[in-house]
Image (cartoon, rainbow, N blue to C red):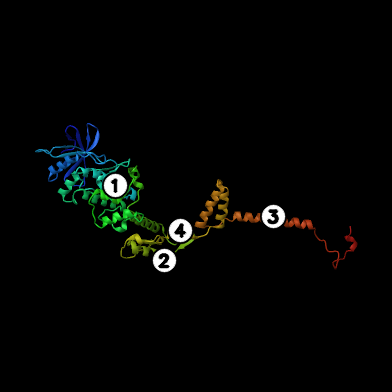
Amino acid sequence: MLTGEVLDGRFEALHTVEYDLPGITRYEGVDTRLNTTVLVDEVTSVAPTAVRRAALRFMSVRDPRLSRVVAVTGGSAGSPTVIVSEPLQGVRLSTILARRRLDEAKASAVVGEAARALLVASAARVHHGWVRPSCIAVDSRGRVSIAGTGVDSELALQAGVRRGKGEGADATALSRVFLACVTGKDADEATEADIPQSTSAEARALCERVLAGKSFDTLTGLLDALGPFDTRVLRNLPSGVDSLPLSLTKQAEAEKKRKRDKLDAARRAFTGPRVTGGVTIARETLVKAEVEAEAVSGSIPLVVAGSPVTPVVEEEPLEDLHDLLTFEEMVDEQVARSKPTTAELFYERLHARWPQSRGITKRLERAHYRAVNGGPINATPILMVLLVIGLVVLAIVAVSLLSQGFGQDDPGGGGNIYPTYSYGP
């Protein structure tokens, strides 16, 4: 089959796309009659006839959550079997779980809706056979859809990767998908420690059952273990993928990168003894902190005042590196513990009284900056205030002296050479 080839005068193969099961060459195509996108699969497995029969059986199943097989062509002598099906709408679960994870409510809704859809197919004795996150998708309306029902089972069997068959295999595979959604890790790699602490008792019991290797016999049993769920929580999920919580593995990687970046920034910024926020960090202190950091992060060259220091230690995980190993964190802690200055308190009271005043706001910011970074004191305002106070005090003293008069002695005092009568009126 070639790109651009048209099948039955209707389905045109445009370009190849990847598929995670061997035995199929997948093309993205277009239905020229309806002008819609379709998937055109050329079966190249060892037993294409069995795959063809599985696709034909599934064509009789009708459920909006199951991606339909639109047409099955070929299969005769000299012509390959080609299966045309609907593509999944929305975002694939595998795309979400590549970096994010789902909370319990969303995970229950996705797996619960998938179980209900496969229950419809199971009633027609058609089973998926290879349920995995890449075959499940959620659109903007919150509708869950599943692709590959029936066909993937036969392909997985011929590839030697299928785990059981029938309804029980689908239920067990969906329980593993639930564990992957909750933890953000593949079910084969997840452990009990990966289950979030906020998980309810019912969901935790289901996860622990999967970790213990216990299977389900029916899809109804899985639905009972999931409990009630609401699919409305899945609305607008494709546009909100970036807001979902990171998987636990990605969280650890992001925290490790954050700490390493802060340490690298501190190392680049340091050029010798430095005063920041009134705290001086000596060369020996930083070297000691760097040596301790190297003990958990591996050997990284350090340059302090032009002298390289490269500790040789065993490399261990960076998760144990404490934030205070960088001098910025040390300074922040010292500044956070310091009490506000008098100027800060004064201008904060004024700013609370007149919050729209630009002058007060500017002086308050200046006071905060001086409290953190220090610097010479601007004595002009202080001297002006002291001068005004001195002038006021001097004026008060002068007025009091003028009101009392000068040079009058007590008439009865001794040693007065003037006659007594001269004091009379």
Q: What residue does disc 1 label?
A: 112
* Amino acid beneath label 4: Asp
Q: Nearer the viewer, residue 46 or 410?
A: 46
N-terminal of the two: label 3 or label 2? 2
Q: Between marks 4 and 1, how big is the CA–CA gap?
A: 49 Å
The secondary element bearing badge 2 is classed as: helix
Q: Nearer the viewer, residue 114 or 344?
A: 114
From the image, state whether disc 2 or disc 4 is nearer to you: 4
Q: Between marks 3 and 2, how big is the CA–CA gap?
A: 54 Å
Res. 319 in view: yes
Q: Between marks 3 and 1, how big is the CA–CA gap?
A: 84 Å
From the image, state whether disc 1 or disc 2 is nearer to you: 1
Q: Which mark is residue 332?
A: 4
Q: Residue shown at 61%/56% (left/top)?
A: 382
**Residue 282 position in % (x across, y down):** 44, 64
**Residue 244 position in % (x across, y down):** 35, 48
Q: Between marks 1 and 2, how big is the CA–CA gap?
A: 60 Å
**Residue 320 position in % (x across, y down):** 35, 62
**Residue 10 position in % (x across, y down):** 19, 32
**What is the quadrant of the C terminus in the image?**
bottom right
* Amino acid beneath label 3: Val
Q: Between marks 3 and 4, how big is the CA–CA gap?
A: 44 Å
The answer to which quarter of the image holds residue 194 is bottom left
N-terminal of the two: label 2 or label 4? 2
> From what the image shows, is residue 29 above or below residue 419?
above
Q: Residue shown at 31%/46% (left/top)?
A: 109
Q: What residue does disc 3 label?
A: 392
Left or right for 246, reference 414: left
